[in-house]
Image: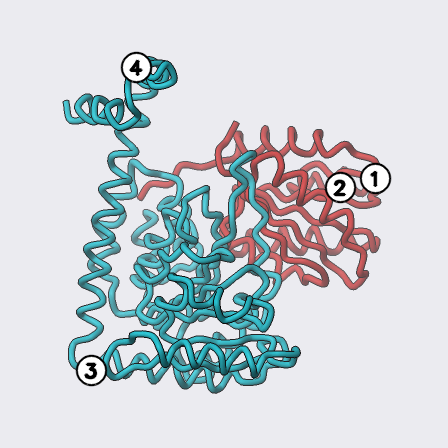
Amino acid sequence: MKLLDRFLAGDRTALSRVITLLENDRDRRSAMLDVLYPRSGKARRIGITGPPGSGKSTLTDRLTARLRKSGRTVGIIAVDPTSPFTGGALLGDRLRMQGSWDDPQVFMRSQADRSHTGGLSEATPYAMTALDAFGKDVIIVETVGVGQSTLDVTDVSDTTVVLLTPESGDSVQAMKAGMMEIADVLVVNKSDREGADQFASELKMIVDMGRWEEGWKPPVLTASARDDTGIDDVYERLDAHGDYLADAGRLQTRRLRQGRSAIEKALGELWQGRLTVLQDAGDAMDRLSERVAQRELSPLAAAREMMDKMAD
Amino acid sequence: MAENIRVLVAKPGLDGHDRGAKVVAAALRDAGMEVIYTGLRQTPEMIVEAAVQEDVDVVALSILSGAHMTIFPRVMELLRERGVHHMLLTGGGIIPKSDADELAGIGVGELFGPGTSTRDIVTYINEEVGRRRVADEI
């Protein structure tokens, strides 16, 4: 049986292969998505982001247990960074996600970001489409440990959880653009540590001062994923946000925005593909780099020249 | 050389000694591979489940407990049960030559003893994966 037929018949090994091909095989990616994409869109998508070491994997593990208790099936994509120097990556998220290892209704995949910026890999949205088309009820995507400006996660999730720890910095750090604005739910993890409650109240103050969509003020919660305390609260607020989105066409609005951004990203990907072909085919890039280095040509003018070539 | 080689590094059994596994994991990473590290106390069932979900090219086990004649055959059996035939099952530990030969007979790859240079492991994996990769018909 061909791969996609096995996938559609519910074969988990085939699901895993499909994700690999979506990652590696740029030539056939599009044909596969033609089959998968129309079958996706039903899953609830939750993004979990936060600085390195804030407990994203452990929280994902705990939430997965609760989702399973409620009878929902779960797909997880956990992204870790690729070394820009060697291309290698150490993917360690599975280490903290072993609570459901023997549950056939939980599928967890580690991804290296392959030097894609934004906290996800280029193929993360595609892997999510595969899990969605496979029939997972909930998809959790865990970003690389991020700072203030890696916010792609909002393009692929309906609800975004920002996870911080008491050490995440004073409230001024948190006021900087980015992380705070993408949060639908804020969690101060490692709540047993000193300063957790104070940090949480500072965050609440910032949320109060900030702007938020009508009808949903991002809650600030405290939890300890390691000790499994406060997780029920997180879980309930996630569900509440799901209900909020289901109301008044809000989810559709988000998905529309996500669709637009997905097209923009795909466009970039196609250009990148053309560029690679062009670089392989000729020395145009070499020639232009030299002229740019000699200050004969600005990088922007060189890029325009490349673009003209690609359009041919 | 095959691109984006994925390796699962796991440590079966109950002993808490994972320095060797970590050294190998870091060496493979530095050789440009994507290494999934699952840590200590992994059962063969856990290892195979992870290998399937991660669709790795290689399963590398560190076994120092002397249980290699149980664990390698069991992992191999479970992989076959899941219809997985292309993955390279390899590893390291203190494994007598006669045992390694017997394991090779059931399809286990080369096993590396103490003092092996990580470069040899990298070279071996690169070659084997290049040979074993299968093209799926979609």
Residue at the image position 33 percent from the left and 13 percent from the top: A287
Q: Position of residue B109 (x, y in %)?
A: 67, 38
Mark 4 or mark 2, whichever is nearer to me: 4
What mark, if any, has residue A247 been given in the picture? 3
Q: Do labels 1 and 3 touch, CB within 8 Å? A: no
Q: What is the spatial separation of the Cα atoms under label 3 and label 4, in whole angstroms?
A: 57 Å
Mark 1 or mark 2, whichever is nearer to me: 1
Residue at the image position 37 percent from the left and 48 percent from the top: A123
Q: Position of residue B123 (x, y in %)?
A: 64, 28
Q: Do labels 1 and 2 touch, CB within 8 Å? A: no
Q: What shade does chain A have?
A: cyan
Could you confirm whether marks 1 and 3 are on the same chain? no
Could you confirm whether marks 3 and 4 are on the same chain? yes
Binning the other alpha carbons within 10 Å of mark 3 as few (below 14), some (14 to 19) or many (20 upward) gives few
Could you confirm whether marks 3 and 2 are on the same chain? no
| Quadrant of the rendered image containing residue A105 | bottom left
What mark, if any, has residue B102 been given in the picture? 2
Q: What is the spatial separation of the Cα atoms under label 4 and label 1, in whole angstroms?
A: 57 Å
Task: Name the residue that disc number 4 marks.
Answer: A296
Task: Name the residue that disc number 1 marks.
Answer: B114
State which chain disc 3 sits on. A
What letter labels the chain drawn in red?
B
State which chain disc 2 sits on. B
